[in-house]
Amino acid sequence: MKKLIWGLASLVLATNFAQAQSNVLEGSKGPKLAVLTPLRGDLQGAPISPEPLPVPLDQLKEVVQDDQNDGARSKTFSKSFAMDSGDKLNLSNRYGDVQIKIWDKREVRVDVDIKTYSSQDGEAQRLLDETTIEAGKSGDMISFKTNMGNRDGNYGSRFRNGKMVWKREVKVNYVVYMPASNSLSMSTQYGNMTMGNFSGPLYAKVQYGNFTAGSLNSNNNYISVQYGKADIEEINVATIKQQYGSGLTLGTVGTLDLNAQYVGVDIKKIRGNAVIKQQYGQGLTLGSVDNLELDAQYVNVTVGTINGNATVKQQYNNISIAAVNKLVIKGQYANVKVGTLKGDGNFKVGYNKLIIDQVNSGCRNLIIDADYAGVSLGFGSGYHADFDVKTNYGKFKSGPAVYKAIVDEDNTKQYSGKIGNGGNAKISIKADYGSVSFN
């Protein structure tokens, strides 16, 4: 068949060209919709002609494959709309990728490549006929939507002894050209999304695919990824939801509201505030943040510098914070480690242990309530404070710069004293079934 393409194409175009155009459907109320109609025709008995095609090859709407790939069919769709600065774009795709490319034109163009595959005679063509693109503009909304026929049955491919014995598949890939600052809402299932730098409001939802982006500069970004990976170089104001998949990687973030489940999270820097909730997965790594509100369950957390204040709830596993100003933390069945505490601290920990390497002079009030947890505190060289320590079934070990007095009541012991010269700073510790040490 490959050798017959030129001759057969003339007859196809002569008898079916009108059918290859986009039909315009106009309902009583909705926008005009352009729906792709694939070519049809009987190629048997067509004469062989060396004459040139009446239209360029790249305008052919349907490509007939050669014999060795006879189970594949394809067609293309392209549509453009004028796009004012206030117009919005909505993309809804399935079983394929969406790629966003930025240009300077005040219009949007969407090029769609549709491919169908089947090991059963005639089914690839049926799948192709049932897959259409619906496009229209109503007011300030421009929309493109993938429509498919009945998806009953199994899709994919199967191999036996290294040889494919069964296959049924549909691929619908979008390439979108649009201005950088218009509002964009897009979704795809079983496909990836990729985009470079973008400054317009963004809503992106990916299911069973990956999301990759450059710099997203809008004050309104919502991203949802399920069963995939997200990788964003820079994002200004972001709300992100990620469930399952290969993890989330963020470069520089302005402010962040994150809900992550069963994924690993790696964030280089958050310039502003962050609210993060993470359950299960390969853990959270955060380089730096201004203020942090964190709720972590069954994940290991590693945070570099918290420039401001933090409120943390950690259940199970471990959390490590290199440096923080004020810190309020509730930890259960979790090891809590703080490098430098620069401001006040309030710790309620149960089981495992709490370690603070260095309490600095900015900490004026430190409260620790520990159950079945060991407590270990170190102090900066210029730190001075009064302290009260109460242990129940536990020990208290103090360093050489600590003066203490003791009240012994069987298994309960109360200690009071000074660190350095004492002063206005106050440390209060209550420990049940755990030891306390000052280093």
Image (cartoon, rainbow, N blue to C red):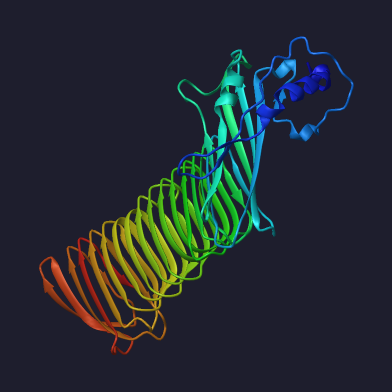
Q: Nearer the viewer, residue 329 or 121?
A: 121
Q: Is residue 142 above or below residue 419?
A: above
The one nearer the camera, 235 or 61, is 61
Residue located 87% across and 27% down the image: 52
Residue that extends furthest to the right in the rendered view of this protein:
50
Instruction: Please state the horizontal and vertical placement of residue 354, each as a whole percent of the image.
Output: 33, 64
**Which x, y percent locates residue 60?**
74, 30
Name the outermost residue toward the left.
409
The vertical placement of 44 against 202, above or below, is above
Observer-nearest of 188 and 77:
77
Measured from the top left, where is residue 77 in percent x and y? 65, 37
The quadrant in which the N terminus is found is top right
Residue 177 visible in the shown view? no
Relative to 34, 315 lies left or right: left
Q: Position of residue 424 (x, y in %)?
A: 28, 89
Nearer to the camera, 165 or 53: 53
Asked whether residue 188 appears in the rendered view, the answer is yes
Q: Quadrant of the C terminus?
A: bottom left
Report the side of 123 relative to 329 (left or right).
Answer: right
Q: Residue at x 79, y 13 (%)?
A: 46
Left/right of residue 230 with respect to residue 114 in the rendered view: left
Please indicate whether residue 171 sits to the left or right of residue 421 in the image.
Answer: right
Residue lying farthest to the top in this orientation = 45
Q: Is residue 217 above or below residue 421?
A: above
| Total count of labels | 0
Which of the 4 quarters of the picture holds residue 61? top right
